[in-house]
Each structure stands twice: as structure tokens, then as C-alpha cells.
């Protein structure tokens, strides 16, 4: 079963990364060196999650996810599905979808700050635009063009659910990446800001632990969606 195989590959991959990480940290010969080991980082991550100051950064990032990324995923699904519904809809939504999905939109961040102020609004807008058009474009390009009379073995039109799940996976990864990038360069709140601040103070344990708080949930969601996507592709 492809679903289980994909999850197993992800577990093995995480185990290999942890083993390589542990080996590289052990080579430096000091547990408190510039490259902390996985056990130290995991313990620090648990400590940070229990700290009120870090929780404020986490809630700041979560607010952008709720106001920017979640609506972007929904809008992207609607636009992508509509663009596949008919030729007219394709030409109505396609030009914007194709163009914006191919653009490095992060370059607009300084302009968004000038237009909207240096609060969390530019982050919400940029995350929304990046994720929404990535989802829509993925659904548009991956949904197969089939004759309306052709159906899959389960009685449903093949490929549509697969394309939607693929779009969600791409949108979530790009959306979270955009959020972290914006927090690194133009914010004083959020987990990305905490990572950057800790790194500037050469506190690698705190920076790595905070990065782990972002990485592990995103990897878990991305792998789960990929497992579903591969299962639906059968």
C-alpha cells in the first residue's frame, strides 16, 4: 500500500537525519559546542514550548497561518477547480494563476511594508498570495483532461482528488516557507524571528530548537498529504 510505504519512508528518513545529526554533533567532542546534538535540541524545544515568551512568538506565527495560509488553501482549491471546469474558466483564471505562480513574489515584501505598514498584515497578504496561486496552479496542471464519460474504478472522475491534495501539499510548504522568510527579515515577532534573533546571538541551541518547532509539524503534514496523494494516484 503506497500510503503506508510513504509514511515508512518518511520515518526512515527522519531516523537517518537524526543519526547523521548525532554523529556530526559527536565529532565536535563537546556537547555545548556550536553544533548541538538532537537530544539537546529536543529538550530545548520542549523547554521553549513551555515558556510564555516563546509561546507569544508561536501564537504570532499561528495567527498568520490562520488569517493567511488557511484562506489561501481554500481559495486556491476553488480557483484551481474552476480553472479546470471549462475552457472559459481556464482563460478567466489561468492568466493570473500561471503568471503569479511562476513569480518570485517574496520580492514584493518591502513594497507591501510600505503600502500596509510594518505589522503582521504584509505577512498575511504575502503568505496568502504565494500559497493561493501555488495551490491553484498545481491543481490546474495536475488535473488530467479526460473525457467526461470516463470514470475511475470507484465511480469517481480520476485525478481530481489527487490534484487537490497535491495542491494543498505544495501550498502548505510554500506558505510556511514564506511565513518564516518574512519573519526573518521584517518582523519582531514569530518563530522565524526567534530563530534569526537566536542565531544573531550565536545561541545555536535555541535557534535549532525553534527551527525544529517549525520543521517537524510541516514535515508531518507534508508527508501525510504526499502519502494520500500517492495512494490516490494508483
Image (cartoon, grey):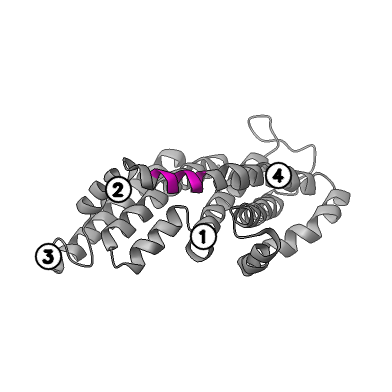
Q: CA distance from mark 3 to mark 4?
A: 50 Å
Q: Which residue is mark 3?
A: 30
The alpha-carbon separation of the residues under discs 3 and 1 comes to 34 Å
**Which residue in the protein does label 1 denote?**
187
Q: Nearer the viewer, mark 1 or mark 4?
A: 1
Label 2: few (<14), some or many (≥20) within 10 Å?
many
Principal SS element in the magenta part? helix
Q: Is residue 160 above or below residue 130?
A: above
* Residue 106 is a magenta residue: no
Q: Could you say where residue 234 lies in the image, as x and y percent from the top left?
A: 55, 42
Q: Nearer the viewer, mark 3 or mark 1?
A: 1
Image height of 8 relative to 199, above or below = above
- The tag earlier along the polypeptide, 2 or 4, is 2
In the image, 127: left or right of 212? right
Please identify the residue farthest to the right as the structure is shown: 88
State the image coordinates of residue 123 (x, y, percent, origin top left). 59, 56
Is 215 displayed left or right of 119 in the figure? left
Under circle 3, the secondary element is loop
How far is mark 1 from mark 2, CA to CA? 21 Å
Q: Which mark is residue 45?
A: 2
Q: Residue at x 80, y 61 (%)?
A: 95
Q: Earlier in the sequence, mark 3 or mark 1?
A: 3
Name the quadrant containing residue 161. Answer: top right
Separation of marks 2 and 4 at Cα, in angstroms: 33 Å
Q: Give the structural element (helix, strand or loop) at label 4.
A: helix
Query: What span is colored magenta in the figure?
Result: 55-62
* 86, above or below 36, in the image: above
Q: Nearer the viewer, mark 1 or mark 2?
A: 1
Q: CA distance from mark 3 to mark 2?
A: 20 Å
Residue named by callout 4: 75
Upstream in the sequence, badge 1 or badge 2?
2
Alpha carbons under labels 1 and 4: distance apart:
26 Å
Amino acid at each position: 500500500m503506497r500510503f503506508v510505504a510513504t509514511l515508512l519512508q518518511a520515518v526512515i528518513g527522519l531516523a537517518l537525519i537524526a543519526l547523521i545529526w548525532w554523529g556530526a554533533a559527536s565529532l565536535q567532542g563537546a556537547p555545548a559546542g556550536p553544533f548541538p546534538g538532537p537530544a539537546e535540541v529536543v529538550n530545548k524545544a520542549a523547554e521553549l514550548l513551555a515558556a510564555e515568551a516563546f509561546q507569544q512568538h508561536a501564537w504570532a506565527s499561528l495567527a498568520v497561518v490562520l488569517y493567511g495560509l488557511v484562506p489561501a488553501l481554500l481559495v486556491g482549491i476553488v480557483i484551481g477547480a474552476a480553472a479546470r471546469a471549462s475552457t472559459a474558466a481556464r482563460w478567466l483564471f489561468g492568466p493570473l494563476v500561471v503568471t503569479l505562480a511562476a513569480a518570485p513574489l517574496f520580492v514584493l515584501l518591502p513594497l507591501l511594508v510600505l503600502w500596509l505598514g510594518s505589522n503582521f498584515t504584509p505577512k498575511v497578504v504575502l503568505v496568502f498570495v504565494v500559497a493561493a496561486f501555488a495551490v491553484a496552479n498545481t491543481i490546474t496542471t495536475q488535473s488530467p483532461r479526460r473525457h467526461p464519460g470516463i470514470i475511475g474504478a470507484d465511480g469517481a472522475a480520476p485525478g481530481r482528488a489527487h490534484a487537490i491534495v497535491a495542491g494543498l501539499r505544495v501550498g502548505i510548504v510554500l506558505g510556511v516557507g514564506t511565513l518564516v522568510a518574512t519573519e526573518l527579515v521584517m518582523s519582531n515577532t514569530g518563530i522565524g524571528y526567534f530563530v534569526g534573533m537566536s542565531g544573531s546571538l550565536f545561541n545555536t541551541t535555541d535557534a535549532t530548537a525553534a527551527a525544529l518547532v517549525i520543521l517537524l509539524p510541516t514535515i508531518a503534514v507534508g508527508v501525510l498529504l504526499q502519502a494520500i496523494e500517492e495512494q490516490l494516484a494508483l
